[in-house]
Amino acid sequence: MTLFRDVSRIIRGIFPVSFHAFRVRLRFVLVVLVIGGAAASHVAYVDVDSQVTAFTDKPCRIEEADADGDVQVFVAAYAECAYDHTLTNDFDTALAHINTALDLYYDSVKSPFHIDPAVLAPLYVQRGQIHLLLYEWDDVLADYNTALSIDPEYADAYYYRGVLYYSVRFEREKAMPDFARYLELAPDGDLAEKAAQYLADIQAELKALER
């Protein structure tokens, strides 16, 4: 058995951004880690399946958001810009845009009691995905942890953190409860089949190590 059962393990990501103005669903294959002995090579590519209900015509519609004057629309526009720059492999600009979205959101709330976890937690997961593409593993984990501290029932964040633990940090024992928690929160979710497969793979690997 190689380090991974199939020699490579794919990190799959979704930018689960849901705001007043748009909803984007996409499947993003983020990083393929190919392990061979002590050497590792990284390949990033995109497989997009998106459904966009707004912000479709232009990659960045900051001016339109400015004309609207709604801070939530501004936040959504910058998050969408971050997504578009990610697709063009301009990760530094994507990171700058998602940071702006976060700053705008925090500036718009009057107190921590007014924070909407359904808006803020996905922004941190989106930023974590960008850090992932930059191979900034500690920052990825920090953003996923922050998302879960904001919304402890945000199922997708458990899934992505589980993938990070398993595929990048090689921490099976930490990945298992994250995949299990995802399945508890979203047994019929879009990622349920993948979470169940990861869980089965880890259990099989741990059992094999006991032999």
Image (cartoon, rainbow, N blue to C red):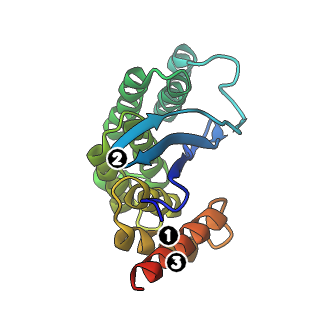
Indicate left or right for 42 with 142 as reference.
Answer: right
Distance CA(mark 2)–CA(mark 1): 17 Å
Q: Going from the N terminus, do you reach mark 2 or mark 1 first?
A: 2
The residue shown at (47%, 56%) is: 160
* SS of the residue under disc 2: helix
* SS of the residue under disc 1: helix
Within-10-Å neighbours for mark 2: few <14, some 14–19, many 20+ = many
Distance CA(mark 3)–CA(mark 2): 27 Å
Confirm or deny contact between disc 1 and disc 3 (CB under 8 A).
no
Q: Quadrant of the C terminus?
A: bottom left
The one of 118 and 92 positioned closer to us in this rendering: 92
Within-10-Å neighbours for mark 1: few <14, some 14–19, many 20+ = many
Dot 2 amino acid type: Val
Residue 136 percent across, percent down from the top left = 31, 39
Dot 3 amino acid type: Ala
Disc ID at residue 140: 2
Residue that numbered label 3 is attached to: 204
Disc ID at residue 27: none
Residue 170 percent across, percent down from the top left = 35, 60
Residue that numbered label 1 is attached to: 179
Residue 194 percent across, percent down from the top left = 62, 63
Residue sitting at the far bottom:
211
Q: Nearer the viewer, mark 1 or mark 3?
A: 3
